[in-house]
Amino acid sequence: MQEKIVKPASGAFMFLVFLALISGGIWSITQLALEALPAEIFWVPLVTNGLAVVVVSGLYTLQPNESRVLILFGTYKGTVKKSGWHWGNPFYSNGSPSSELKEERARNITTAKPVAGTKPDSRFKISLRARTEVGDTIKVNDRRGNPIEIAAVVVWRVSDTTKAVFEVDDYRTYVKTQIETALRHVATGFAYDNSESGELSGELTLRGNPEEVAHELRKDLEQRLAVAGVAIDDARLTHLAYAPEIAQAMLRRQQAEAVISARRKIVQGAVGMVELALADLEKSGSVTLDPERKAAMVSNLMVVLCSEREAAPVINAGTLYN
């Protein structure tokens, strides 16, 4: 089904028609009571008052960014998106809760919980405003199989009222379900953090590439929610952490990786400094070092540069050979 935008009748004009009908009905009743009119036309006030009731029952208003789906005896007649005071056929469907909303309302009544949030779309009025859905924190396995906790916030809006009403039972419940499904799917496609091999290959991760992860989540949601006529404005992760059962182990692993990375940089810097020192000594010619003395000098310099403690000076009164 394709969404069809229709132009509604003016509510102000139809209200004037209602006033004219109700005034005519009152006048005819008065004239019949005064016997100014023949008794045979007693049906006139009944008809005018009945028409007045029909006219007034078709009046409705739409706020900005609000629409109404017009359904007449099960047939889709169009969608009104123009805000203001309008009039429509009083026999247009007034909307009813979906089966899921009925079940939720029944459960809330049974458990004495408030039924707020289960109100159906009155007269099939659907808000076109942006809505924010804050997902629950769920536990999933990342690409490497590590259990993690993850949650997301999604900003969405109804873009096609026809699909939202006719393609799914309740579009709000459908959106909430698909957000969790898409989040699980995206989370399993990324690792939580880089390993040594991942750093070399440039692997995308949940913690290291939030923009790319958000783009994939939004793309997945757009595909899933297109059937319900829902557009995604934004999707972001709001919570990301290792599951409690492996959090301590992963913290120790991260600490070990940080220590190894720092040591690697220290050693690389120390090697460069030693090479520079030997090259300067040979260039100046002030000291002649044989291979054994070079090895001893390199050993001493590496110990001094790579040690976590300050070096203690030692005065050697002899030579390297005695």
Image: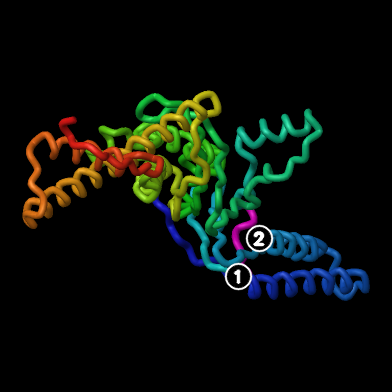
Locate residue 27, reporting x and y percent.
Answer: 83, 74
Distance (Cα) linking label 1 and label 2:
14 Å
11 up-or-down from 234: above or below: below
Which quarter of the picture shows residue 28?
A: bottom right
Q: Position of residue 312 (x, y in %)?
A: 37, 42
Instruction: Look at mark 1 in the image and give the residue it sits on.
Output: 84
Return the disc, 1 or 2, that comes first in the chain's sequence. 2
Per the image, label 2 sits on a secondary structure element best described as loop
Q: Residue drawn at (49%, 52%), measured in percent from left and top?
A: 156
Residue at the limit of the structure toward the right, as seen here: 34
Q: Which corner quadrant of the image does residue 101 belong to? A: top right
Q: Is residue 202 left or right of residue 312?
A: left
Magenta-colored stretch includes residue 86: yes
Q: Nearer the viewer, mark 1 or mark 2?
A: 1
Residue closer to the observer: 240 or 162: 240
Judged from the image, the secondary structure of the residue bearing numbered disc 1 is strand
Q: Which span of residues is magenta-colored?
A: 85-91
What residue sits 64% from the left and 42% below the top?
Answer: 96
Vertical order, 58 against 71 (above or below)? below
Callout 1 amino acid: Gly
